[in-house]
Image (cartoon, rainbow, N blue to C red):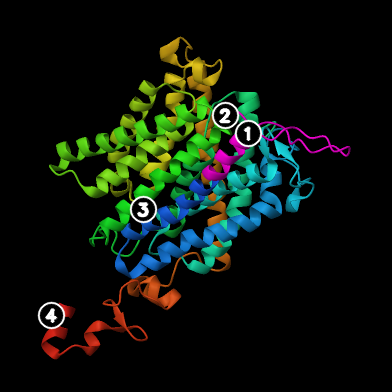
Amino acid sequence: MTPATALPLVLASASGGKPPVDTGDTAWLLAATALVLLMTPGLALFYGGMVRTKSVLNMLMMSFVSIALVTVVWLAAGYSLAFGDDAFGGLVGGLRHAGMAGIGPDAVHGTVPTLLFATFQLTFAIITAALISGAVADRAKFSAWLVFVPVWALLVYVPVAHWVWGPGGWIVDALGALDFAGGLPVEITSGASGLALCLVLGPRLGFKKDAMRPHNLPMVMLGAGLLWFGWFGFNAGSAMGANGLAAAAFLNTLAAGCTGLLGWLFVEQRRDGHPTTLGAASGAVAGLVAITPSCGTVSLLGALVVGLAAGVVCSYAVGWKFKLNYDDSLDVVGVHLVGGIVGTLLIGVFAVKEMTGGAEGLLYGGGLGQLGRQLVAVVAVGAYAFAVTYGIGKVIDRLMGLRADEEHERTGLDLTVHAETAYDHGVLGHGAPVSASLPTAQKAKTQA
């Protein structure tokens, strides 16, 4: 649990007295909020480089439009339902602060302005929705995505955020599971939801037959770098203050990202004989995913092990889609679901009381109790996210169609949906192929 996320909303009194705002904590959280928001454009580049040239812009758009859609929903009702006073037995908050009602500039949450806390949490909701797009790349209808994101945010992300971080949420209060920065509401929720949409949509045309390699690995590496940079705000910002816990979470985040990268490359070298740039980027992200729930609960040694475990396990998990025949286009399931599970469960093994304030993992004398609580939380959140997302996907598919037309998918969603292309050499004018303007001999070579 993030130490300050479960604090009740404190408002300025009518007489003018108000709890003090710590300027240092506020300054750090302002910076952390900007860092987390930057992660979504970073994710757009990471995903954009991994798809083929014909769908780059569509991939970028799915992330960028999520910023706008989730922001509107969050301000209208999402924040109140996630972090308002519990209204339904630990399941969801009320609508007292719908439209951010009653939260003025003098409202304080812990030691920071409530408006800042709400904005910080908004950035988490944004990137969680955007993460799902990687599972359905190249084939989801953009208009359906515009409907899916706000509905999903309200029905899936908001309740889970309340369970884990909200006042009275059942996972934090009744169960006692730990999640410092979002393994459950961000990583496992997005991964399970991505799997559900994969099954609703079905595989891409040519899945397991055509080569679907990343078209721009430098873009992938740039996106991964921006994600890693923003992740320091994601994890260290969750301490809700400029303090020692933030510093520990910061260092743990760096350490786990490094061992995740090394673990993935080790597997690639042994299995394939070649350490790759895509593997380095994916391994770093896997380590960062796994340390997200545990960065504020484990020691530095634990962080190194968590990252390494995620790098190794996720490098194998991304291949499961070919054996189990689900087309997770950009490995959201293999990295975020599996990495989130690894990091959340290992809290029950490596948690230390110096970080948690009391709870200890199996290796530090805590027994199996905390590990069991972590497992219950993982199963509950994963099952809920999968089931509700599958239902949302099915309803949208029936009402308006969730999958792009076959011809659009073959041609590429950039041109057919957005009337644009990422690269001039791909098309000329109004979608005419380059070969149309080439000499006969060169045209034949291009078509070949």
Determine the CA span between mark 4 and mark 2: 59 Å
Q: Are marks 1 and 2 in contact (CB under 8 Å)?
A: yes
Secondary structure found at label 2: loop
Labels 2, 3: front one: 3
Q: Which residue is mark 1?
A: 5
Q: Residue 356 at what x, y percent from top left?
A: 53, 20
- Please provide percent x and percent y for residue 297: 48, 24
Report the amino acid beneath label 1: Thr
Between the residue at mark 1 and the residue at mark 4, the CA separation in whole angstroms equals 60 Å
Residue 445, numbered label? 4
Quick check: 329 left or right of 280? right
**Pointer 2 residue:** 1
Q: Is residue 327 above or below residue 406?
A: above
In the figure, residue 431 lies in which quadrant? bottom left
The majority secondary structure of the magenta stretch comes to: loop
Label 4: which secondary element: helix
Check if mark 1's residue and mark 3's residue have beta carbons within 8 Å: no
Kind of residue at disc 3: Gly
